[in-house]
Amino acid sequence: MPRPHRLTTAAVLALALCLTGCTGTEPGDPQLDASAPTTATAESSSPTGAAVPPVDRPLNIDDFLRSPCAALTKQQIDAFLGPSATAKPDPAASTGPDCRWGTDMRHARIYVIFPRVSERGLAAVYQNHDEKYDFFREMPLAAGYPSVAYGVTDNRGEGECTVRVGVSDRDTVDITLYLSDNKVGQLDPCEAAHEVATAVVGNIKARN
């Protein structure tokens, strides 16, 4: 049986160094994979009018609709946010089952939601981005699945970014990440959210 997606060696090493006295990164800040691209690369030439990327191997997310906090393992949360982060599941949320991890508003937080307001997959974002979203950026594949960063408003300057991943042509998962106050302006929240999204999709794949 496939195992849950594990943190990259680089991320685990960064965490270990941090807990033993690093000064550049504190527990509670997402650990970016050192091998990940520092800037996003679009899967198509332009987001304007770009074709919606197909999902060749759709994933079943039924387990996560029932238990949204299973999207990330305890090990992954400890690495991304630190061991004091707590999980708050809401499988009956009006927009779709979600789970929120964090400590307080000053530190990094992660929200994962499985939207149930549309069955159009990534098409819902692609086809509305010119009119509905102030921010839209195609991101690299997340564990082999197409992803975009988007927002009704562009909150990257405040350390917030949402990445949506298409896990089938009908279903998506949203990962919203908030940087801790002392990292706003130093890290790209969309790159950090994409790192978390890669872990989430890896865990979904492990149950398929």
Image (spheres, rainbow, N blue to C red):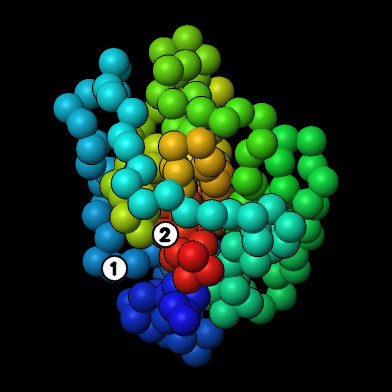
Q: Which is nearer the eye, 180 or 59? A: 59
Callout 2 crowding tier (Cα within 10 Å): few <14, some 14–19, many ≥20: many
Residue 87 vs 4, above or below: the answer is above
Is residue 93 in sight in this rendering? yes
Left or right of 139 on screen, residue 173: right
Q: Where does the image place residue 48, in percent across and percent down from the top left?
A: 29, 17
Residue closest to the far bottom: 20
Q: Which residue position holds label 2?
A: 198
Q: Where does the image place residue 187, in percent across and percent down from the top left?
A: 41, 52
Q: Which residue position holds label 1?
A: 34
Q: Where does the image place residue 181, in percent across and percent down from the top left?
A: 59, 52
| Three-letter code, disc 2 | Thr
Q: Where does the image place residue 152, in percent across and percent down from the top left?
A: 55, 23
Residue 99, quarter of picture: bottom right
Of marks 2 and 1, which one's residue comes earlier in the chain? 1
Query: Which residue sits at x=28%, y=24%?
Result: 51
Query: Which residue sits at x=48%, y=70%?
Result: 206
Q: CA distance from mark 2 to mark 1?
A: 14 Å
Q: Which is nearer the eye, 170 or 150? A: 170
Q: Which is nearer the eye, 196 or 97? A: 97
Callout 1 crowding tier (Cα within 10 Å): few <14, some 14–19, many ≥20: few
Left or right of 115 on screen, residue 124: left
| Three-letter code, disc 1 | Ala
Tell how many labels.
Answer: 2
Do the numbered discs 2 and 1 sit on residues whose CB atoms are within 8 Å? Answer: no
Is residue 196 in sight in this rendering? no
Left or right of 108 on screen, residue 86: right
Query: Which residue sits at x=64%, y=55%?
Result: 62
SS at badge 2: helix
